[in-house]
């Protein structure tokens, strides 16, 4: 729990989650140049830095990391009008890139208000030309944000880490709110990734169904490029899912949602995810997509493999009402957003609420925070975020120790 520092620093002190445990009266020195960097983490003691440090109420955590987010605060990762508007634009020969970049930057500001350090925007299934265009736009937004950060212009934004394509190589039997006309098999998606590989450089996660034709070769390609292959929206058996993880897939997209239910004689993907020690596991912890009593039970089985995600839709944070999500009319009541037929269309709460929910369900604050910080960072193989350590991004928050309620954003 040590680090070196040079030059003037800002400093905070207080109880902090460091290395998986709560350290009382820790001292964290950091600068705000660029994206901001933690320079030292020590015990407070009586050093000169400790004397001028601001004391923080609550528990200091690294900012949250959401690896599955479709939108929030009225901002859609696909730009104004969502998928429908993007499809109309691309079919008409128009480039929607600037609209998408602007939407992602606005979403980044919304996420920061909810304690996020970073996020991976996720798209629904799209035609390959539109999907390619969207991934390129995510790359542009990421690079422009980093450039602005060096000029001190992006401090109020969560970092954009890359793209998560949820589909289109998913099962029509477990499509959820995805358009069935846009679904393809693994071979079709792999062909697109191989055709113009530079267009896909921003890809960080691909959700796929392992039982589809060509899925094995697709997983092999993703593993080679160090892109996370996540199993979801799938009717895979226990054996098919296990084989895919053993092949190199690393994650599970929103456990229990978009897959066959667990049964004591046919455990399916749910049972396989709980049993497979190499698999990280997303869970939507809004109390709607998964009963929080079940979430706690699964969390005790999963341990450090649990990754809390929001799967939030653009209506998240707007309160009750009727909203257009692209061409789909959705109704939000409380914590639930549904289509007219009752199909869930994503969550309306973000990770700050997930941590509160998990804590209320009986998880320790350390375990709940791990699921929203260190676990997603481990999934993405990054040490830049997700921990309070020298060299990590100085995107920190403080939460109430008992409830997990967000108290403040520190940097």
Image (cartoon, rainbow, N blue to C red):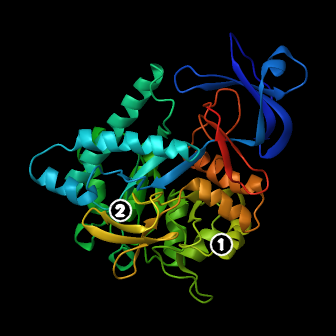
Total marks shown come to 2
Asked if residue 18 shows in the view, the reply is no
Q: Farthest residue in the right direction? A: 46
Nearer to us of marks 2 and 1 is: 1
Q: Of helix, strand and loop, which one carries label 2?
A: loop
Position in image of residue 135 (x %, y %): 32, 45
Q: Of helix, strand and loop, which one carries label 1?
A: helix
Position in image of residue 310 (x %, y %): 52, 59
Task: Pick the residue in front: 221 or 31.
Answer: 31
Q: Farthest residue in the bottom direction? A: 265
The crowding category of the residue bearing disc 2, from other C-alpha atoms within 10 Å (few below 14, some 14 to 19, many at least 20), is many
- Residue 14 figure quarter: top right
Using the image, determine if residue 366 lies above or below residue 411: below
- Residue ID for mark 2: 167
- Residue ID for mark 1: 292
Using the image, determine if residue 290 lies above or below residue 28: below
Using the image, determine if residue 112 lies above or below residue 128: above
- Residue 388 figure quarter: top right
Left or right for 18, reference 79:
right
Left or right for 52, reference 39:
right
Q: Quadrant of the C terminus?
A: top right
Asked if residue 270 shows in the view, the reply is yes
Q: Closer to the N terminus: mark 2 or mark 1?
A: 2
Position in image of residue 215 (x %, y %): 38, 64
Q: Residue at x 65, y 26 (%)?
A: 391
Left or right for 63, reference 158:
right
């Amino acid at each position: 729990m040590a680090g070196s520092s040079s030059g003037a620093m800002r400093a905070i002190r207080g109880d902090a989650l460091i290395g998986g445990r709560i350290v009382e009266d820790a001292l964290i020195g950091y600068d705000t140049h660029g994206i901001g960097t933690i320079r030292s983490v020590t015990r407070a003691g009586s050093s000169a830095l400790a004397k001028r440090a601001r004391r923080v109420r609550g528990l200091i955590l690294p900012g949250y990391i959401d690896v599955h987010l479709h939108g929030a605060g009225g901002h859609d990762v696909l730009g104004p009008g969502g998928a429908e508007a993007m499809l109309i634009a691309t079919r008409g020969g128009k480039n929607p890139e600037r609209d998408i970049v602007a939407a992602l930057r606005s979403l980044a500001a919304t996420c920061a208000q909810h304690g996020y350090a970073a996020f991976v925007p996720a798209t629904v299934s799209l035609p390959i030309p539109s999907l390619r265009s969207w991934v390129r736009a995510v790359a542009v937004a990421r690079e422009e944000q980093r450039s602005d950060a060096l000029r001190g212009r992006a401090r109020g934004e969560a970092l954009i880490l890359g793209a998560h394509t949820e589909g289109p190589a998913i099962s029509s039997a477990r499509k959820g709110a995805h358009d069935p006309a846009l679904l393809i098999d693994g071979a079709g998606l792999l062909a697109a990734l191989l055709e113009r590989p530079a267009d896909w450089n921003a890809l960080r996660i691909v959700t796929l169904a392992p039982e589809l034709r060509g899925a094995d070769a697709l997983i092999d390609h993703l593993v080679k490029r160090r892109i996370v292959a996540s199993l979801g929206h799938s009717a895979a058996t226990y054996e098919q899912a296990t084989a895919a993880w053993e092949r190199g897939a690393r994650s599970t997209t929103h456990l229990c949602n978009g897959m066959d239910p667990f049964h004591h004689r046919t455990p399916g993907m749910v049972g396989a995810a709980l049993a497979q020690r190499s698999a990280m596991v997303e869970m939507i912890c809004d109390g709607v997509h998964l009963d929080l009593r079940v979430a706690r039970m699964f969390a005790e089985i999963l341990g450090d493999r649990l990754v809390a995600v929001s799967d939030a839709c653009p209506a998240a944070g707007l309160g009750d009402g009727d909203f257009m999500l692209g061409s789909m009319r959705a109704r939000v009541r409380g914590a639930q957003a549904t289509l007219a037929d009752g199909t869930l269309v994503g969550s309306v709460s973000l990770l700050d609420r997930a941590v509160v929910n998990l804590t209320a369900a009986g998880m320790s604050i350390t375990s709940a925070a791990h699921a929203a910080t260190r676990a997603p960072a481990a999934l993405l193989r990054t040490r830049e975020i997700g921990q309070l350590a020298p060299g990590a991004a100085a995107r920190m928050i403080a939460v109430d120790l008992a409830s997990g309620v967000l108290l403040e954003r520190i940097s």
